[in-house]
Amino acid sequence: MNPTPFTVTITRNGPCIVAGGVPMAQQHIVTDAQGESIEWRKGDHFAVAQTYALCRCGQSATKPFCDGSHSRVGFDGTETASRDAYDRQAERIEGSSQKTDRKVR
Ligand code: FES
């Protein structure tokens, strides 16, 4: 007998539905003294369920799980990443100029 395949279904303006009894655990970013990320540290494991609804809107009070808040906040899940080349996405931002009366050495 084949094991149940894992599936991930993105719902319209709602959570990701993960099915198949996928084990899930927290991962924490460990930083150095300068605040730079240096590694991942394993955290708690969640009880394995056959199906999870994972929050995609960032508003759930029970992250990483969906609590239905996406409906309350009117989450628009249609945003996608641009496929334009990086230099075509770049934007020039002019800064303010500074003047000084002192000679800089
Ligand atoms: S996707 Fe449902 S609460 Fe975020």
Image (cartoon, helix red, strand yellow):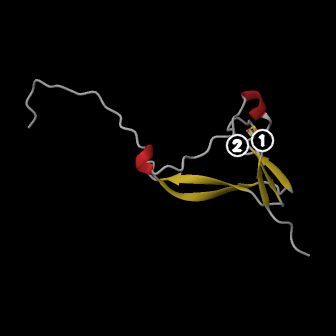
Q: Image check: 9 left or right of 103?
A: right
Of marks 1 and 2, the one in the foreground: 2
Vertical relation: 68 (above or below) 64: above
Vertical relation: 1 (above or below) 60: below
On the question of residue 94 being in view, the answer is yes
Q: Which residue is drawn at 9% across and 27% down?
A: 102
What mark, if any, has residue 55 been given in the picture?
Answer: none
Q: Which residue is drawn at 54% across and 46% down?
A: 82
The quarter of the image that holds ligand 1 is: top right
Residue 36 percent location from the top left of the image: 45, 51
At numbered mark 2, what does the secondary structure look like: helix, strand or loop?
A: loop
Report how far apart the C-alphas of labels 1 and 2 lie in the structure: 8 Å
Furthest residue to the right?
Answer: 1
Q: Residue at x 45, y 48 (%)?
A: 35
Query: Residue 13: which quarter of the image?
Result: top right
Residue 46 percent location from the top left of the image: 78, 54
Which residue is the site of mark 1?
66
Do tag 1 and tag 2 residues touch (Cβ < 8 Å)? Answer: yes
Give the residue type at disc 2.
Answer: Arg
Which residue is the site of mark 2?
56
**Mark 2: few/some/many CA within 10 Å (<14, 14-19, 20+):** many
Give the residue type at disc 1.
Answer: Cys
Residue 2 percent location from the top left of the image: 88, 74
Q: Image check: 48 left or right of 97?
A: right
On the question of residue 34 being in view, the answer is no
Looking at this view, is 28 or 67 the one in front? 67
State which tag comes first along the sequence, 1 or 2: 2
Residue 101 percent location from the top left of the image: 10, 23
The answer to whether the residue bearing label 2 lies less than 8 angstroms from the nearest atom of ligand 1 is: yes
The answer to whether the residue bearing label 1 lies less than 8 angstroms from the nearest atom of ligand 1 is: yes
Looking at this view, is 103 or 38 the one in front? 103
Vertical relation: 22 (above or below) 94: below
